Image (cartoon, rainbow, N blue to C red):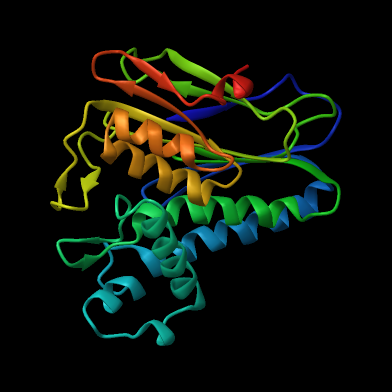
Amino acid sequence: MADAVTEPEQAAATVRHAEEVMGTVFSFDVRGGEPAAVRAALAGAVAGLHRADAVFSTYREDSEVSRLARGELSVDRCAPEVAEVLELAAEAERVSEGWFSTRYQGSLDPTGIVKGWAAERAARAVRGVEGVHGVSVNGGGDVQLLGAPEPHRAWRVGVADPLRPGGLAAVISAAGTQELAVATSGTAERGAHIVDPRTGRPAVTDLVAVTVVGPRLTWADCWATAAFAMGSREGLAWLEALPDVEGLLITAGDEVRCTGGLAARLG
């Protein structure tokens, strides 16, 4: 779980919006741009989130993914986003050597990648508005940051401490980059919901949380899930080997393990 930490208000226009969708809340913080144009782009981004929910929800019997899983549709008869997400998920499965998967006990379920992909896509849609210089989209604690809130100020994200409610395990800074994502997988908020793809059952691991930092939320979300299922030792080694990715792993014994480059992102 993470929350954007912003600086005091400045003269630049700020537009904020919160939307309940996909069973969580997506919070937008947009800096710069003409407010009416920003709000129009926000409306489009929010509509895109609801469309993604309608297409990909496994809780809706009439969603395209549910119909695809039942064999009532083929991928080429689904919305183009379905093929896009399934291709991304296949790449995530390949990179993680199967620790990330969209199939559990034989059933198609791409929701593990959809939220991060949808939040990143929404952030990029709003960032395209003329004059916008900073965008933060927080989808249920996973955050995509683009640009900066103000000149010479960086976005900062607080990572919740899973063992100390109300406390922070770290603060991640986006200083020096135009794109940064922070995603956390763990048991503190939703219990044992992360599945071991090899067994189809909740992952048995020594971890309580994994936070992944990288440029794109689509991948950060997948890598956090995969590393959590791997456990602290294998997960840390795997994250170390991924390019442009850093990780913070917290064990049930309150041990904190970090990738070598994470220190440069703290602040």
Q: Quadrant of the N terminus?
A: top left
Front-lying residue, 60 or 190 = 190
- The percent position of residue 203, horizontal first and vertical second, equals 19, 40
Front-lying residue, 74 or 30 = 74
134 relative position to 266: left or right: right
Q: How many marks?
A: 0
- The percent position of residue 260, horizontal first and vertical second, equals 52, 24
Above or below, 54 against 75 in this view is: above
Q: Quadrant of the C terminus?
A: top right
Front-lying residue, 115 or 216 = 216
Above or below, 63 against 244 in this view is: below
Q: Quadrant of residue 227?
A: top left
Above or below, 88 against 183 in this view is: below
206 relative position to 12: left or right: left
66 relative position to 258: left or right: left
Residue 2 appears in the rendering: yes
Q: Quadrant of residue 73?
A: bottom left
Above or below, 175 against 121 in this view is: above
Q: Residue at x 36, y 48 (%)?
A: 23
Q: Which residue is drawn at 29% across and 74% down?
A: 62
- The percent position of residue 42, horizontal first and vertical second, equals 66, 53
- The percent position of residue 245, horizontal first and vertical second, equals 54, 38
Residue 141 appears in the rendering: no
49 relative position to 238: left or right: right
Q: Residue at x 71, y 21 (%)?
A: 7
Q: Which residue is drawn at 33% across and 54% down?
A: 97
